[in-house]
Image: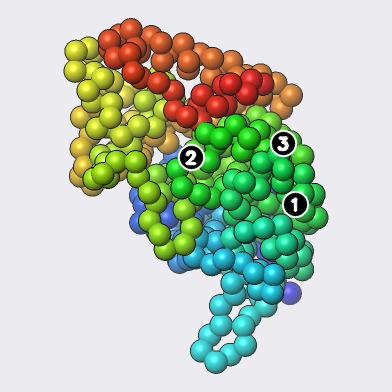
Amino acid sequence: MTAYSELQRTDARTALRDRVFVAVSADDAIGTAASIAATPNSGLVIVDKVASRLIRPLKTIYPSSLTIATDPATYMHYRATIDRPMDLPRILDSPEMSLNEYMDAQLASGQDIAFMPAGRVRDHDVLKAIVGSANDVAAPNVVLPVALPGRLLKARYVAETVATLAESRHQVALVVTGQFDPFKDPDVSEGLRGVAEAREIFLHRTDFAAFEAIAHGGLGGSIGWCTRLRHAVPGFKPAETRKDPPDRSPVVLVPEIDSLRHTAVIEPWFRNTAPPLCVTPGCCGRNLAWLRDKPADHADACTHNVRNWMPVAETLLAQPPSYRAHWLHNYRIDVDLNYAALRRRTGVMTIEMDDSQATWLSLGR
């Protein structure tokens, strides 16, 4: 019989509830991310096929204060089919291991939560196959990642999406795939709220949409340490960009407007006024508009971003569940006022809310 840790004997819902995790990969500053995420309201989701080798060193440093989940991100390279909803490994000429064997092996690495190797979803028939396959897993602390296109959250499809997710015996981590920001579409955003309320989903590898999911009944969420983990563009085609050539400057959180922007975009805003200095205790203390396309500045930007959204997450989670949507809507109203103040201060009248920010605000509570 598999020996699970005390946390692993707990349902995954308990381990994920009321937390906003930091999603990281082996290429990121995992040690720095862990030092920030080792709190009762956070944790790490290591999104990487080789995540298992990273767990034991982290657990040695943070034996109980850091909750760690692992996600092989199978959905990024494998499209599920009805006949083969999970992409299970096989060693040389040996038979493909069973899903139960695979999940037991994953949990043996010492993480608290393990995601299944589910492929990405293209329609409801495939989604039903994924849920059916996952329901055979006996391990207690596993999560079913459901990577689906935004259209399956739209009004025409969302009821069937909710009904299918309701059949899952395991916690669902929803990953909304596609180019650019899927939540700029009000129909997709409204659908996410409905799914969160109906199925208590965990919104995975996203941006501040995680707050919306939590505010409207979701279990929790994860926000990417870097841009590639705040957005899921599956397959082998790179993420598209609206700029040619692509903007390689660091993406930094401007706290007063709660917005992640390339420094090349915000630098002109502050040429005739006081620069945007990071004033968060223990953070970088840098002029955010002067970060450049070099490794140290990208690293500072990623650290700054997490240190500055974490207090927002903690404040949201401190609210009674019935009040969270009201609190978040009022917070977004304050952010909108901050945009107006920033336009007056800089004299740049073209500074506007992000598309998804404007969408969430327009939907109200």
Query: Quick one: SS at disc 3?
Result: helix
Q: Please, what is the three-letter code of the amino acid marked with disc 1?
A: Leu
Quadrant containing the C terminus is: top right
Q: Residue furthest bottom?
A: 93
The colour scheme applied to this rendered structure is: rainbow
The one of 179 and 266 positioned closer to us in this rendering: 179
Which of the 4 image quadrants contains residue 132?
bottom right
Residue bearing the label numbered 3: 194
The one of 322 and 284 positioned closer to us in this rendering: 322
Q: Is residue 44 left or right of residue 144?
A: left
Which of the 4 image quadrants contains residue 54?
bottom left
Q: Which mark is residue 181?
A: 2
From the top left corner, tell me how far across and down residue 300 is, in percent: 29, 38
36 to 121, vertically: above or below:
above
Residue bearing the label numbered 1: 165
Mark toward the start of the polypeptide (2 vs 3)? 2
The one of 108 and 296 positioned closer to us in this rendering: 296
From the top left corner, tell me how far across and down residue 360 is, in percent: 57, 26
Disc 1 versus disc 2: nearer the observer = 2
Query: Quick one: SS at disc 2?
Result: loop
Query: Quick one: SS at disc 1?
Result: helix
The one of 271 and 113 positioned closer to us in this rendering: 271
| Residue neighbourhood size for the residue with mark 2, other residues' Cα within 10 Å, grouped as few (<14), some (14–19), many (≥20) | some
Residue drawn at 38 percent across, 9 percent down: 341
Q: Is residue 23 left or right of residue 163?
A: left
| Residue 34 seen in the figure | no
Quadrant containing the N terminus is: bottom right
Q: Please, what is the three-letter code of the amino acid marked with disc 2?
A: Asp
Mark toward the start of the polypeptide (1 vs 3)? 1
From the top left corner, tell me how far across and down residue 327 is, in percent: 62, 19
Residues marked 2 and 3 touching at CB (< 8 Å): no
